[in-house]
Amino acid sequence: MKRLLAIVCLIAVAGSQLCRLEAADPEILAHAIDSRLQARFDAEQLTPASRADDAEFFRRLNIDLVGSIPTAVTAQDFIRDANENKRAIAIDRLLESPEHAEHFANVWRALLLPEAETDRQIRYFLPGFELWLRQRRSENVGFDVIVRDLLTVPITGTEERPQHVLTNLQAANPIAFIAAKEADPGKLAATSTRLFLGIRLECAQCHNHPFDQWTQEQFWNQAAFFAGIRRKGRGPFAPVFESPETQSIALMNDASNIVPAVFLDGHAPELHKHAIPRLALAEWITSSENPWFARATVNRVWGQLMGYGIVNPVDDFGDSNPPSHPELLNDLAVAFAASGYNLTELYRSICRTEAYQRTSQQTDSQESEPSLFAKMAIKPMSGEQFYDSLMQAIRHEAPAESQKLTRNEDPMRRRFLDTFGQQGDQNNPDTSVLQALTLMNGSLIGEATHAESGEFIQALSEKPSESNLESLYLATLSRLPTDEEKTNLDAYVSKTTGPEYGQRLGDVLWMLLNSAEFRWNH
Amino acid sequence: MTRQPPFDRLLSRRSLLIGSTLLGCSASGLLRALAEEAGPSGPKRSCLILWMGGGPSQTDTFDMKPGHANAGAFKPIATSASEVQICEHLPETAKWMHTMSVIRSMSTREGDHGRATEDLRTGYRPQGPIQFPVLGSLVAHECGPQAGELPNYVSILSRGLFRPGIPPAGFLGTDFSPLLVGRGSESAEQRLSVENLSLAKGVTADQSARRIDLLKQMEQPFLAARPGISAEAHQTAYNRGIRLMSPSAATAFDLDQETPETHTRYGTSLFSQGCLLARRLLERNVRFVEVSLDGWDTHYDNFAAVQRLCGTLDRPWSALLQDLKDRGLLESTLVVWMGEFGRTPVINPQVGRDHYPKAWSVVLGGGGIRGGTVVGRTSDDGLTVEDRPVTTPDLLATICLALGLDPKKQNLSNVGRPIRLVDFDARPVEEIVES
């Protein structure tokens, strides 16, 4: 009871501080989060999993914040570092690194332009689009600014002289969003609503939403905000123009029913004759009055870091799919809005929680319920995260600065992403048969684990030593081998000499790269 | 890892199948005993889906409207079924209409590619957190765990067809997910194949076996401490991959085993290769195979596109039917031609046709189907269904019946509630099903 009282007081204190939160101490929010989760553990009489060790935490943090496992050297340095505060320091350092902005750009590119996975033409837009995302993230502008930039991207063309969408491949520009959605008002509206408000409206396109409050008319009310956008011709490169006086749209299956632009909360914007309606939509979505924007965004970031949304799936808010921890969702949203939609603050607070720093090892079957957040979830790696981690492990050193920014144009990486990018559910990492075959027999790992072509293996086999196994483990799993692993592998490797020794080391590297521990973010 | 001699197994299962159709119910007691011994009874027939991605135009293929303004450029031709006329650009297919039934009254509710694809492939419209399995996974699940080297469900040229973020097998788990063959980006000169099926350069079979043993031993503690779907899926994928690597399984996917004459008969397109591969797999008792042909999303220049696509479709489809017939497999294989919706009967200003779920066509043929028949009717302008509307659940229940599965059977879903193979209000088109 005493403990419960303490928690209640803590929440009250945290809550009151959140309300006047400016540049808040991330520790306060982190604490408030853990208290909310703890209340549920107490109610369920559950002991959550213990704190992850340094190696497990550091590998996870790197994959989540910078999109790749750490180098062997940084992993070892972190494990050895005696500073008590080293986890908080690592969180801050990674959030400020250029790799974090790059990873953020990859994640949001995949959400905003999923068309690029299947439509090769759209891939021409990626350098400029990702550069735009990267720049905005490294400037740490509020997420509301990013969303407004995206939705209000200028379209200056006229019907006679439409605007080209792709003039400079390398220039930072969010216009790919319009082009990839085929300048289609319905697609633009559905995507914006789902990604920024967490509401799936696309099912109301042809009929009223089967399980929720949304009507078909409301879908087209949203589309009306984009109704003035047109494109001349077909394909993603077709030039576009916009007629601001178009502020209404006809229903897809009922051309006689023309509806105006109305926000999802039922209010209609006051639009002048030449006002572009989507500007009003961007303002409304990102306004502090909007009941969905902050909640949808914090829930998505929470889902990315914790492997499961407070509302799950993360973009499916609605009466039929309530949040697991409504107060927690509220705390996060309030703090996020008060911080000026500061993503760095949000990442920092969540990464500092006990919840984020728990081990993924299950000690009690009660922990298996993902919506309790009683242990770290096993998270899938995106194709990018996995490929970059794989290259990191094989190369055994950080990539050159110049290689990083052009990574998405690397054809080998692209091909790899075709096998590893799409599959897999957000909550349960899913290794497909083809992925297993690629990892077992593909040329990338094949060459890296071959005694004569693998540079890492060659370098190690020149100096047979017990520390070679440690090097392999640090490079791949970002940890040292356990005593048992050492014993087993010593027996496998040590009795051999010469070329046979190199081959055996190659086998160990092959085993590590094919292991579930390497494949997942855990 | 246990290695069964695959052809012995194939022969025994094949002869059991033939036996069951020949002997009928006279030996049913014995057969039932055998089936019980073998675990779940599984489907009576194999299934082949020819998936027309993008939504094919019914008005220009199987539900033509000669004389009407919506008819467009193509003429109907007579077929081997006296009651049925189809498009002039499907002359080879026309010779097989006596084995097929055209459902002209499909009436579904999703007009977005993603949602309609999920609806038609799972039988359920997307809703909240429930991860519905696709039909192929449902059938694979009914077959029970993969017994031999080949998977129960192979999906050819269908990347992009699967829902991002949801595994194809949904709540059934990755044991029942398809093996995907072909990226769809191959040039027609390339042979369709399973990538990375053979060992990496310089790796011997002994070394590979040693590596696999090492992997299984070393990753055990990690997996044991993290039980759940992920751990199972990881092990399943590796085990299935390892089984596929056996020489006899690899042969199944090797199109070079076919004669040049056969290749000529099927044609050289990727879809042709896909159909030929489908035949090789069906011969080896793979229970569910699908081959995709994309490009039917003809918002612009519909007629040029449909003519070209019909050209791609016609020859391999009929060659496949001929081969199945010659091998005595047509009676034990249901062949389905379908997409996610149809297209507007009204031709748009870009000489295209747009998405149209309200009235469209699907073709069922081969085993379990009363051929030469037509189900339902659309109005003269093609805009509405006038007789026997067929919904998505109706269609999937019909497929289940033709395969010998009970559409009312329930599976436990990821949200803890039982879900039927096909939604309970389905009314299968029983009049065309021959059990």
Image (cartoon, rainbow, N blue to C red):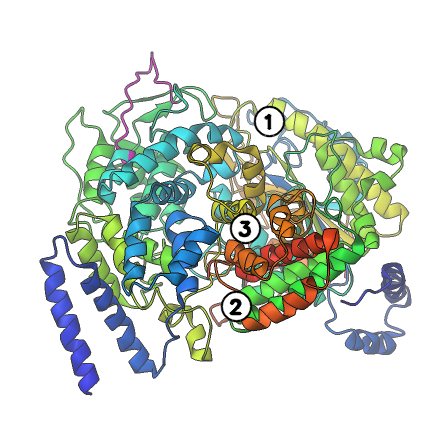
> Who comes first in sequence, dot 1 or dot 2?
1
In-image side of A506 versus A145 (left or right) = right
Q: Residue shown at 56%/69% (left/top)?
A: B223
Q: CA distance from mark 1 to mark 2?
A: 44 Å
Residue A144 is situated, as x and y percent measured from the top left of the image, at 22, 43
Viewer-side label of 3, 1: 3
Q: Which residues are magenta?
A: A150-165
Residue B26 tag number = none
Q: Is residue A161 magenta?
A: yes
**Mark 3: few/some/many CA within 10 Å (<14, 14-19, 20+):** many
Q: To which residue does mark 2 refer?
A: B413
Residue A257 appearing in the image: no
Tell me whether circle 1 and circle 2 mark residues in contact (CB < 8 Å).
no
The amino acid sitting under disc 1 is: Ala
Report which quarter residue A59 is drawn in.
bottom left
Q: CA distance from mark 2 to mark 3?
A: 20 Å
Q: To which residue does mark 1 refer?
A: B71
Q: CA distance from mark 3 to mark 1?
A: 41 Å
The amino acid sitting under disc 2 is: Ser
